[in-house]
Amino acid sequence: MEFFFRPEGVAVIGASRSPRKIGHQVLRNIVEGGYGGKVYPVNPKGGEILGLPVYKSVLDVPGSVDLAVVAVPAPVVPSVVRECGEKGVKGVAVISSGFGEVGNRELEEELVRTVKEYGMRLLGPNIFGVVYTPARLNASFGPPEVVPGKIALVSQSGALGIALMGWTQTEDIGLSAVVSVGNKADVSDEDLLDFFSADGNTEVVVIYMEGVKDGRAFMEAVRRCPKPVVVIKAGRSERGAQAVSSHTGSLAGADLVYDGAFRQVGVIRAGDVRDAFVLARALSELPVPEGDGTVIITNGGGMGVLATDAAEDEGLPLYSGPELVAFRSAMPPFGSYRNPVDITGMADPTMYLRALEVAQESRGVHSVILLYCETAVCDPLELAEGLKKEYRREKPLTVAMVGGSRTAEAVHRLNRAGIPAYTSPAEAVRAMKGLYLWKEFRGKRAPLSGGAR
Ligand code: COA
């Protein structure tokens, strides 16, 4: 699978001079994304595109080609893929639609046969491409800029995957990879899980899934994966399942069956895409808590109550032991050191940092949720800078900040510094819950049968 992510040479078949065509945009993203290897546009018209010489066939390319991205109309795909086989290409990523998803199964089978005949691997068809930020490879027609990070995103939906790529930018969510799997005619979620399991640049795998072809193989791949796997499984409702079948032709299956299987192997199931990234952000940045006992620190009583309700709903046990008394040193006399620890609206950054210190020192506290409502006495940016300096990363810390534009900037700063920050208390609680789920699920990671692969 390595050649999809760190190819030595990339050919774009169907590269076009016309900026409105997908073959042009893929080439542009590869060139402008800063990919360091050789790039070969292929188009029977020849000439030059974006300053690169165009080859009339992949067979004319002088150097070796590991990856071919194919963006020509479906009926032409099998012949260009055969040429790729002759050339010795290792992986083909077929962007073109018009295969199994529209009932054209024969054409898809022909494509798979050709790929197998030459010992190649096929990503797709019906995909938007593949991105791997450590190699600065953006072989997709998604947004040109991708924030580098530790989350690998695998999407069965093209448009949603593209939208998420853009969204991760505005939300400061760093990605190691984005892979569009489309019809999964050959490369499956399992293949990708195995790749990301061993990939030193990936900490968490997020999968948007409509259906799996081989449930048992997927479960085994999850068990083999030593990293958190967060799945957004679409088609939960009966109507949703019908929509899935006309979208990617997948069988959504009974949701209860998926849910049970996910639980068995320790998949962290996300309710929707936002939830998936709330979880993945914390899972990719924070240490796993060593034990139960969360403390909520807040300058607003209401925020504290909302977070307590959310913790109750999530089954997240709050710390209630004797060490809470130490929080008195971080609040005015009318504050409350019961959990939630209410350091009051008078709290300034010094009081917050003192409360954080107490939580970091306390042996009974294993995780911290810090909440902030914007007040004139506590500048959010000063608080964010203080947290960046004082947070020791020994226990997980999630933050929720509610306020105006300075608060929004503080949230950005924290996220960019790898301290998961959200704009609602429920999300900060949910993110912490994700870490506790992963703590519980880690133990489930052992092969179903035989030794570890
Ligand atoms: N080798 C190389 N290039 C070839 C070729 C061949 N054998 N045959 C044709 N081409 C060239 C064409 O000449 C054209 O280049 P030009 O602009 O210089 O003429 C280019 O390949 C593209 O072909 P064109 O016929 O113009 O198709 P298109 O760009 O309008 O559409 C697809 C091609 C693949 C994008 C389209 O068929 C498709 O499948 N679109 C859906 C993609 C999608 O949504 N995927 C899923 C996303 S989630």
Image (cartoon, grey):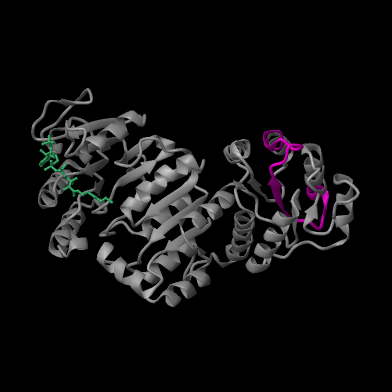
Q: Residue at x 41, y 70 (%)?
A: 236
Residue 102 in the image: x percent, y percent?
Answer: 18, 62
The image quadrant that residue 101 belongs to is: bottom left
Magenta-colored stretch includes residue 318: no
Instruction: Tell me the quadrant of the picture where the C terminus can be found.
Output: bottom left
Q: Is residue 94 left or right of residue 8?
A: left
User: Furthest-left residue in view?
Assistant: 45
Residue 106 in the image: above or below residue 117: below
Q: Is residue 452 visible?
A: no
* Residue 136 horizontal/vertical position (percent): 39, 34
Q: How many tags in the picture?
A: 0
Residue range corresponding to the magenta coloring: 359-384
Q: Tell me what residue is drawn at x 81 percent, y 48 percent.
A: 343
Q: Is residue 164 above or below residue 190?
A: above
Closest to the observer, 390 or 290? 390
- Residue 376 visible from this viewpoint: yes
Furthest-top residue in view? 51
Residue 292 placed where, x, y %?
73, 63
Q: Position of residue 164 (x, y in %)?
A: 41, 48
- Snapshot quadrant of residue 146: top left
Picture residue at 80% right of the left edge, 42% below the top: 347
Work out whether 124 lies above or below 417. Answer: below
- Give the left or right position of residue 413, taking residue 322 as reference: left
Name the one closer to the observer, 332 or 208.
Answer: 332
Say which residue appears at 8% left-offset and 32% top-offset.
45
> As displayed, is residue 225 above or below residue 410?
below
Q: Residue furthest right?
A: 333
> Quarter of the picture for ligand 1?
top left
Position of 184 with respect to 381 (left or right) is left
Q: Is residue 25 left or right of residue 266?
A: left
